[in-house]
Image (cartoon, rainbow, N blue to C red):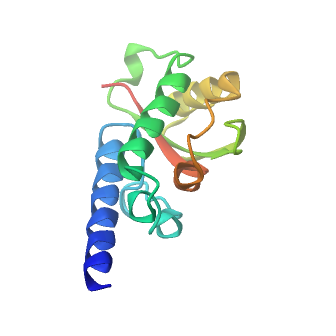
């Protein structure tokens, strides 16, 4: 039991680090309360590889990158947006349909471009399993032009 708890804790820390890395590079993720935190991170703990669903952390990270790519295909940016960041909370249905999105923070110009891209996307591929869906059903996407 202690080994399983330690393994689960290490896995949660690795997943949180992965989310932080996503956020810091302008991708989907958690972060902290001061850097676009994901309020649902607590709800996703204990899922993934610890439950025997395979490498849940790796699969989730790949799915997050997939969501980002799908939206970025429709994301029109201008050089004037360089260095600006807009965080958008995205809600997904189990089949990948985008059911809602709200601006969390950021300047009007880049957020308008981000919201427009999400509106044109409408749907992303469905999450591969329930654990990944739980992690991404309400997540924050950071749009940024580096």
Residue 105 visible in the current orientation: no
Between 116 and 131, the one nearer to me in the picture: 131
Which residue sits at x=45%, y=64%?
51
Is 25 situated left or right of 90 in this image?
A: left
When asked about the image quadrant of residue 34, the answer is bottom left
- Residue 27 x %, y %: 40, 38
- Residue 130 x %, y %: 60, 52
Quadrant of the image containing the N terminus: bottom left
Between 83 and 50, the one nearer to me in the picture: 50
Is 57 rendered above or below residue 32? above
Is 95 situated left or right of 135 in this image?
A: right
Between 136 and 107, the one nearer to me in the picture: 136
Which residue sits at x=36%, y=62%?
32
Is 32 rendered above or below residue 98? below
When asked about the image quadrant of residue 128, the answer is top right
Which residue sits at x=44%, y=14%?
78
**Numbered circles on residues, count:** 0
Is 79 rendered above or below residue 29? above
Which residue sits at x=27%, y=85%?
2
- Residue 66 x %, y %: 48, 30
- Residue 71 x %, y %: 55, 25
Residue 131 visible in the current orientation: yes
Quadrant of the image containing the C terminus: top left
């Amino acid at each position: 039991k202690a080994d399983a708890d330690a393994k689960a804790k290490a896995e949660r820390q690795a997943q949180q680090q992965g989310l932080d890395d996503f956020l810091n590079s302008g991708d989907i993720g958690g972060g902290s309360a001061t850097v676009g935190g994901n309020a649902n991170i607590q709800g996703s703990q204990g899922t993934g590889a610890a439950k025997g669903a395979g490498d849940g952390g790796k699969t989730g990270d790949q799915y997050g990158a997939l969501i980002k790519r799908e939206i970025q295909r429709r994301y029109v940016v201008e050089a004037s947006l360089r260095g600006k960041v807009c965080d958008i909370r995205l809600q997904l249905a189990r089949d990948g349909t985008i059911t809602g999105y709200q601006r969390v923070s950021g300047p009007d110009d880049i957020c308008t471009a981000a919201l427009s891209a999400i509106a044109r996307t409408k749907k992303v591929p469905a999450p591969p399993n329930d654990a990944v869906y739980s992690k991404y059903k309400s997540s924050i996407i950071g749009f940024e032009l580096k």
